[in-house]
Amino acid sequence: LDSLLPEVAEAAKRAKANWEKAGFKVLITQTYRSPKEQEQLYLKGRQGKLGEKPVTNARAWQSYHQFRLAIDIVPLLRGQPIWNPRTNEEWTIWNGVAAFLKSEGFSWSKEWKNFVELAHFQWGTEISLTDLRKQYGVKIGQTKE
């Protein structure tokens, strides 16, 4: 979590403390992702087999991960990750963990219309990626920081 911006890291740490207090077990699978890593994931998805789903649709600097504003997680049930919840128990766990992150200012991409991903939460979505790229002086696809 320390790779996030300080304010975002503190919010994530508060959410983590709360979900742990509630008894939820959660793996944090990704926070900061370098522009180079993001671009490699994007390109990898385009080199796959016909009909294979891309790893990501976001190029470098098209993800809040590069701006240290996003976190990916997966809750655990009996030690196993719940990637695709199907039961009421699994959804209860996901919704419980999400509630802690949302209470700290994160938005959950499961609730979005254009980008639905269960594991992704981001902080400060009132700041557009376009504005962030201008602020940081970077361009889509650029792998330098």
Image (cartoon, grey):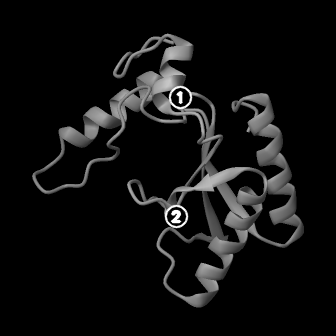
- Give the foreground label among 2 and 1: 2
Outermost residue toward the bottom in this view:
88
Residue 135 visible to the viewer: yes
Residues at marks 2 and 1, CA–CA distance in whole angstroms: 21 Å
Which residue is found at the position 59% from the left and 80% from the top? 91
Tag 2 residue: 111
Q: Residues within 10 Å of mark 2 (few under 14, many from 20)?
A: few
Which residue is found at the position 63% from the left and 87% from the top? 89
Is residue 11 rendered to the left or right of residue 97? right
Question: Where residue 11 appears, x then y in whole percent?
Answer: 80, 45
Residue 73, compared with residue 43, is above or below; it is below
Residue 79 visible to the viewer: no
Which residue is found at the position 36% from the left and 37% from the top? 58
Q: Return the residue nearer the eye: 105 or 78.
A: 105
The image quadrant of residue 32 is top right
Tag 1 residue: 66
The image quadrant of residue 80 is bottom right
Question: Where residue 65 appears, x then y in whole percent?
Answer: 55, 35
Which residue is found at the position 51% from the left and 24% from the top? 131
What is the three-letter code of the residue carrying label 2? Glu
Is residue 138 rendered to the left or right of residue 132? left
Residue 131, compared with residue 50, is above or below; it is above
Is residue 56 rendered to the left or right of residue 51? right
What is the three-letter code of the residue carrying label 1? Gln
N-terminal-most mark, 2 or 1: 1
Residue 54, compared with residue 86, is above or below; it is above
Question: Where residue 43 appears, x then y in whole percent?
Answer: 26, 33
Q: Quadrant of the N terminus?
A: top right
Is residue 119 rendered to the left or right of residue 23? left
Q: Circle 2 — which element?
A: helix
Outermost residue toward the left in this view:
50
